[in-house]
Each structure stands twice: as C-alpha cells, then as structure tokens.
Image (cartoon, rainbow, N blue to C red):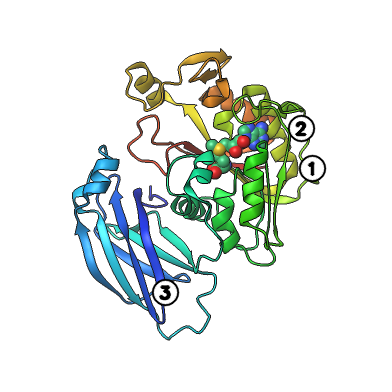
C-alpha cells in the first residue's frame, strides 16, 4: 500500500525572500530511510534551487535529539530563485522546504513570508511549552495542512488556544474569508494572545473561566458543564494541541460532544492525546517511554502526577475509542507520537484526526 508521505523530522532556522532570492536553512532527517533530496517551493510551485549546503553534520541537533538517526548529515542551506522579482507579491506566500525520500515527499518545513506579527517573548511562550514559538507554530500549520487538509478560508475553533501559538501561523495563513476563534481557561494566556493579534479582525480570543487544577484553579465553572458559545455546525475545523493531555475523562467526554455539535458534517477535529497502544504499554512497563504516566485515575485513564492530575493525562485506546464514538465523531487516523517510543511520528504527542459523521 502506498503511504501518504515519508516520515521526516526537522526544523527551519531561517527563511527569507529578498527580491527574487529565497533563502532557507535548517535541518531534516528521515525517520526510516534518510532524506536523499530536497526541493524548495514558493506558493506551491517548485523553484530552481541551489544547495549551498546539504547533508552536513549538526552537533546541536545531535545533542538535542540523541535518539535520532542521520543527524550526522542533516543540515541544509538552500538558495532558490523566483521566476520574476516579486513586487509586494510575497505578502502571505507559503515557502516550503520539501524533503524527499526515494522521491516520496516528506513532512514539509514551512513558513509564510513575511512574518508580520510580533513574537511573544520567551518567558511568555513558556506558558505553553518549551520549544521555539515560531517553529512550533508553523510546524503545526504544516501538519494541519498535510493531514488535516486545512485551507485558507477555513472556519476554525481552538479550545485551549493558550497564548496563540498555533493561531500565530494560522493568522498568517488564513485569507479574509477564513475565521478563527480561540478560548482558554487561562486569563493570562488570553491577555497575551489579545496583545499579539490586536488588528486581526478575523481572529478572536476569549477567556472561559473553567476549573483546571493546573491552569485555572479558581475557575468558576467545570469544563463538563461548559457549552461552547457557538451555533451547531458553525466550524469546519477544530484544533486542540496539548489540551486533552491536561483534561480529565468527564471533561474530555463533554468537550468531544461539544466539538461534534459545533462541527459541520464532514468537518475535522485535529487533536492530540497521550494514548496507550500496545507499544506504549510495553514501553511504559519497561521504563522506555519518555513520560511515566502510570498512575490509575479512573477507568482507562492514567496520570503522571496524582496531586495535580491535569499535569499530564493519558488514556487507554479502548476508552478513547468509546468516548469518541459516543460523541458522534469518527477516528479517521491516528499518528502515534514520539512520547511513547514510536520510531515514526509527526510530533511528540499522538495526533488524532477525527471527522464529524
Ligand atoms: C500545554 S498548553 C497548550 C496551548 C495550545 N494549545 C498550544 O499548543 O500552544 C494547554 C492549554 O490548555 C488550556 N486548557 C486546559 N484545560 C482547558 C479547558 N477545559 N478548556 C480550555 N482550555 C483548557 C490551558 O489553559 C493551556 O493554555
């Protein structure tokens, strides 16, 4: 059976368009076979590209990802030439580095150029996790486009949007017909988000004062009682990255039902979980998983930290399947994450692509 794409993993350090010259540098490895070629695309079209550097070693990547193969030949530096000098036409254009593995496309490394919004400072971005804010944002956009089919005029809801890390790339990508609504239980995160996106008329961020022991201990309403303030079938895309991994079963069940309600038929929910498949169970039992989420919390639900269960929450696959089916959503695909020891992954957590029936 042919595969959708080759599993590759990497990051862009920089990308720029000056006149007719596109420059991109970063690193990428194959997770099975290694990357043997690379192409640069501008606005969806391949452009003539010179490899200034390719397959060079990278001590910093080797240090940061000791478990990855091929880091001794992962760095690239590319220079592409646009067909004609763009005059203001690079506004909002997608530049993509496409790794190739035996001619099959890998996971693109993408940016919209130019980046026009202000990047939050490092201490602020720590609220939503480690890692480079812009790189994480655009790598999630690449996955949303690749596996979720996200288009420029999507109608997007993001529960647990934090300070807008995923929204940042989305704001650069959406056109005027698209819209985005984010809500989060953290008042501070929403304040930061509102300061990053002051002029974006199609991007809205709201505080929802819901209880979460880790993120909003004084929350007035329980997540299981919260009705999303949107009409039935209003959205075509719902995104939750690293949110269900901080929510308890009754609340997850209720959020899935609300997501199903606000999605149009055929709409998708791109969300992440820590889910136990057989490999995760084996690796947890032998200490090979990267997170020791082993404390039983409820039927089919396990936590890392008993005193603050929302710190990291994992689910048995059968429990998740039942909750998702009850909500009227259908699991279209699961992409297992790196956290539990899978060798091929899109990202650290398990990515679930759910579709409204
Ligand atoms: C690790 S952060 C991820 C933020 C964002 N999704 C991202 O990927 O950058 C988890 C977020 O989920 C939010 N959260 C937790 N429980 C929530 C709930 N029931 N409803 C909405 N947001 C919630 C937290 O406040 C926090 O901002």
Question: Mark 2 highlights which residue?
Answer: 226
Across and down, in percent, residue 159 comes to 66, 41
- Between residue 116 and residue 304, name the one nearer to us: 116
Residue 54 visible: yes
Secondary structure state at the residue bearing disc 2: loop
Mark 3 or 1, which is nearer the eye? 3
Q: On the rendered structure, is 328 left or right of 317? A: right
Question: Mark 3 highlights which residue?
Answer: 17
Q: CA distance from mark 3 to mark 2?
A: 45 Å
Across and down, in percent, residue 183 comes to 69, 43
Residue 150 visible: no
Residue displayed at 32% across by 17% down:
286
User: Ligand 1 is located in which of the four quadrants?
Assistant: top right
- Of labels 3 and 1, earlier in sequence is 3
Residue displayed at 33% across by 57% down:
104
- Between residue 154 and residue 266, name the one nearer to us: 154
Secondary structure state at the residue bearing disc 3: strand
Q: CA distance from mark 1 to mark 2?
A: 9 Å
Across and down, in percent, residue 128 comes to 53, 40
Relative to 38, residue 215 above or below: above
- Between residue 198 and residue 267, name the one nearer to us: 198
Residue displayed at 55% across by 66% down:
116
Mark sitting on residue 229: 1
Relative to 104, residue 318 above or below: above
- Of labels 3 and 2, earlier in sequence is 3
Q: Image quarter for residue 269?
A: top right
Q: CA distance from mark 3 to mark 1?
A: 41 Å
Relative to 52, residue 223 above or below: above
Q: Image quarter for residue 213?
A: top right
Q: Is mark 2 within 8 Å of ligand 1?
A: yes
Secondary structure state at the residue bearing disc 1: loop
Structural crowding at the residue carrying mark 2, measured as other residues with C-alpha within 10 Å and reported as few (<14), some (14–19) or many (≥20): some
């Amino acid at each position: 059976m042919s595969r959708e794409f080759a599993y590759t993993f990497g990051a862009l350090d920089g990308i720029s368009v000056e006149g007719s010259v596109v420059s991109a540098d970063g690193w990428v490895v194959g997770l099975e076979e290694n990357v043997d070629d690379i192409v640069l695309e501008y606005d969806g079209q391949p452009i003539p590209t010179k490899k200034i550097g390719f397959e060079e070693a990278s001590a910093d990547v080797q240090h940061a990802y000791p478990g990855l193969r091929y880091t001794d030949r992962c760095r690239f530096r590319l220079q592409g030439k646009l067909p004609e000098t763009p005059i203001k036409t690079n506004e909002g254009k997608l530049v993509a580095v496409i790794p190739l593995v035996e001619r099959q496309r890998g996971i693109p490394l993408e940016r919209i150029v130019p980046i026009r919004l202000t990047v939050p400072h490092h201490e602020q971005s720590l609220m939503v996790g480690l890692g480079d804010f812009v790189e994480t944002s655009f790598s999630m956009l690449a996955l949303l486009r690749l596996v979720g089919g996200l288009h420029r005029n999507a109608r997007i809801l993001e529960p647990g949007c934090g300070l807008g890390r995923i929204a940042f790339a989305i704001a650069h990508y959406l056109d005027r017909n698209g819209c985005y609504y984010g809500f989060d239980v953290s008042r501070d995160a929403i304040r930061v988000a509102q300061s990053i996106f002051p002029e974006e008329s199609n991007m809205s961020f709201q505080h929802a004062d819901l209880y979460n022991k880790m993120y909003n201990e004084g929350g007035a309403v329980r997540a299981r009682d919260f009705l999303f303030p949107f009409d039935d079938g209003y959205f075509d895309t719902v995104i939750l990255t690293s949110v269900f991994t901080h929510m308890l079963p009754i609340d997850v069940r209720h959020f899935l039902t609300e997501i199903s309600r606000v999605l149009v038929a055929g709409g998708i929910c791109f969300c992440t979980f820590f889910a136990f498949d057989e490999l995760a169970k084996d690796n947890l039992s032998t200490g090979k998983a990267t997170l020791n989420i082993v404390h039983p919390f409820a039927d089919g639900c396990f936590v890392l930290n008993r005193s603050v269960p929302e710190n990291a929450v994992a689910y048995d696959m059968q429990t998740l399947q039942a909750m998702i089916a009850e909500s009227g959503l259908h699991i279209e695909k699961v992409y297992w994450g790196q956290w539990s020891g899978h060798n091929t992954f899109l990202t650290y957590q398990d990515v679930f692509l759910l579709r409204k029936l």
